[in-house]
Amino acid sequence: MKFKRESREELELNLTPLIDVVFLLLIFFMVSTTFQKESEISLQLPKASDTAEETNTDTIEVVINAAGRFYVNDQELVKSDAESVQAALQKVTNGNRDIPLTIRADAQTPHQAVVTAMDAAGQLGMLRMSIATSQSTE
């Protein structure tokens, strides 16, 4: 008696499509990734506290209201441009660059107005400048 033996095909797992997909993903990620060296600036940001420091009577205070109007030591400026702020600061300081300057701005003040005040003080070479904050009441 002769038993007929059936030959079985060996199963193969074709990995070619899988490798193709992996290579395509690798190429996609290599092409879509951007390699940019971004410069970073090291900053030490000031902290707001609820304790008031000693107030010096010889300080300059620049107040900016919500409309962007400037007040230097409680006197309103005619114009709200950098030249007017710079002239007012020059008049108040009499060339003394070491007088502390505090900038107080309303929460709704345009950011450009604060930058204008800081720029005017920087062009005069003022050494001690701070921005006043208020405590949050949450």
Image: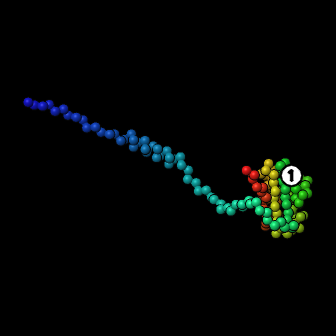
Q: Is residue 55 above or below residue 80?
A: below
Number of marks: 1
Q: What residue is at 16 percent from the left and 33 percent from the top? A: 5
Q: Is residue 42 left or right of residue 117?
A: left
| Residue farthest toward the left in the current orientation of the protein | 1
Any part of residue 91 in sight? yes
* In the image: residue 35, left or right of residue 121: left
Q: Where is residue 90 in the image (x, y as percent from the top left)?
A: 87, 64
Using the image as rendered, state which of residue 125 and residue 44 is in the foreground. Answer: 44
Q: How is the image coloured?
A: rainbow
At a point 84% along the width and 48% down the height, the residue shown is 67
Q: Is mark 1 on a helix, strand or loop?
A: loop
Residue at 82%, 69% (x, y): give it: 98
Within 10 angstroms of label 1, few (less than 14), some, or many (20 or more) residues?
some
Q: Is 9 positioned to the left or the right of 71 in the image?
A: left
Q: Where is residue 129 in the image (x, y as percent from the top left)?
A: 79, 63
Q: Which residue is drawn at 25% across and 38% down?
A: 10
**Residue 36 higher or lower than 25, as above or below:** below
Residue 52 or residue 123, whichever sits in front:
52
Quarter of the image with the N terminus is top left
In the image, residue 127 sits, relative to residue 5, either above or below, namely below
Query: On the image, numbered disc 1 is attached to which residue?
Result: 69
| Residue 81 in sight here | no
Q: Where is residue 45 in the image (x, y as percent from the top left)?
A: 70, 60
In the rendered structure, which amino acid carries the disc numbered 1?
Arg
The percent position of residue 110, horizontal first and vertical second, equals: 79, 49
Q: In which quarter of the image is residue 53?
A: bottom right
